Amino acid sequence: MTHIAVIDIGKTNAKLALVDGATLTEIAVVTRPNTVFPGPPWAHFDLDGHWQFLLGSLRDFHASHGVDAIAITAHGASCVLLDANGDLAAPMLDYEDPGPDDLADAYNRLRPPFAETGSARLAGGLNVGAQLHWMFAQDPTLHRRTAQILTYPQYWAYRLSGVAATERTSLGCHTDLWNPKKNSFSTLVSTLELEGKIAPVRLASDVLGPILPQIADKTGLPFDTPVTCGIHDSNASLLPHLMSRQTPFSVVSTGTWIIAMTIGGTSVNLDPDRDTLFNVNAFGDPVPSARFMGGREFEIIIGDGCAAPMPADTHAVLDQHIMLLPAIVPLTGPFNGRAHRWLPTEPANGSGRRSIIAAYYLALVTSECLTLTGHRGEIVVEGPFANNRDYLNMLAASSNCPILATNTATGTSQGAALLATDPVQHEPESARIHPSEIDPQLRLYADRWIREVADPSSST
């Protein structure tokens, strides 16, 4: 039996999952919060804390089960700058830091058009090019001190193997640095004078090397334990389905972000003003995508928590058309720029009704994302919302498509694990929901929600 340790750094939590390479089932999962420090010099992630957590967890996993390989996945919109000694040239910027907005006008004059990059213009540091432009302006010596720029999953591969790399799925995640049609860097690399500073592009499945001797000493892992290059987390969710499913289909990756990725859909013109974009999959192909900060919105709606909904709560929500209109986080998503509204009135905090409405709201925004990407066929839901039956039911009703909810604790771990296994076809186990099984009132609710969203008074 092959055991693959999957490093999975999400925006909210850092995780290590131990995956059975034969079945792609998770044997163990440990997590820690993805803490953000306020600065100076800017809001940044606790990379040292993650590193100690990962080393300790690798040691524990190997002692209890054995670890045969390491695979890596991490959130997008992030990069790490190294100096000539291979150390951090600067703390890793949190993409939610609003600092880059201070130079938004100047950056807008520099960045390539959507037609070149498939990358929408986003707030804060969500475009890596905007991060780099702003950080270099804040620290005039940083550009000179930066010897190599790594995409985020590959930073952890570098810490483990000593080999620096970048990779297409992270470069293609609205960085402005990649041209997905030409499968090469965009003109922004030259504009920002980054030639020679971006680490070599490798395949996600490439083995960068064995772990460094000091890592073997600290963890007890064999000295020849291979480390794969790594992959952007949403594309890790997509990969098992690219290898096993017939087109057309879409994968909805859920977590802090809910990202809809459509394979073999209808031809559409993506609208960057509605937060659509081209992601790049593990094989280097452009993927029509749309996203919004669904997990963050759910946390805001729920607050300190809600009671488990009762059947009476569901009946009340559907009968009275109690609903939430977008957007809770107005800087992203297909309804960005709108102020949220409750209809007819906001339910009490902590109530079962509020929990149901939050799930319906996320499902309906997800359905809009799928429409924008030209979805056809089955919808596969990965990650934590695959366990939310209210979300799944409303998504089936609003899309009128079959829903497959995968049963993994971390929706990205299977795809990342595939990077370290033979490329056999794995189809994750799923629970299937067909629209014909859904209460017709859910479709009526969805129709009413769509009409309300179309009302101009929903906009700021």
Image (tube, rainbow, N blue to C red):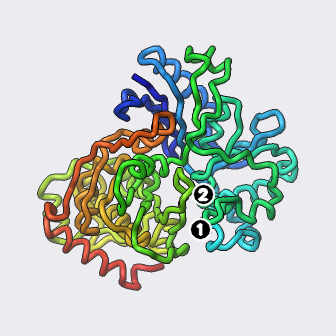
State whether residue 187 is above or below residue 90.
below
Q: Which residue is mark 1?
A: 118
Q: Which of 141 and 302 lies nearest the eye of the viewer?
A: 141
Residue at 53%, 34% in the rendered image: 71
Could you tell me the amino acid type at mark 1?
Answer: Gly
Q: Which mark is residue 341?
A: none
The one of 432 and 282 positioned closer to us in this rendering = 282
Q: Quadrant of residue 28?
A: top left
> In the drawing, does residue 407 fall left or right of residue 139?
left
| Outermost residue to the bottom | 456
Residue at 71%, 38% in the rendered image: 164
* Amino acid at the residue labelled 2: Gly
How far from the left and from the top, in percent, is residue 333?
Answer: 47, 67
Q: Residues within 10 Å of mark 2 (few under 14, many from 20)?
A: many
Q: Are marks 2 and 1 in contact (CB under 8 Å)?
A: yes
User: In this rendering, does residue 340 appear at all?
Assistant: no
Marks 2 and 1, Cα distance to the nearest angstrom? Answer: 8 Å
Please tell me whether residue 318 is drawn above or below residue 78 in the rendered image: below
Instruction: Compare residues 238 and 151 and report the one nearer the observer.
Output: 238
Q: Secondary structure at mark 1?
A: loop
Could you say which is closer to the camera, residue 433 or residue 333?
Answer: 433
Viewed as shown, does residue 72 lie left or right of 135? left
Against 202, is 210 above or below?
above
In percent of width and height, residue 325 lies at: 35, 71
| Structural crowding at the residue carrying mark 1, measured as other residues with C-alpha within 10 Å and reported as few (<14), some (14–19) or many (≥20) | many
Q: Image quarter for residue 216?
A: top right
Residue 172, which numbered label?
Answer: 2
Residue at 57 percent of width and 55 percent of height: 284
Kindly state the secondary structure of the residue where label 2 is placed. Answer: loop
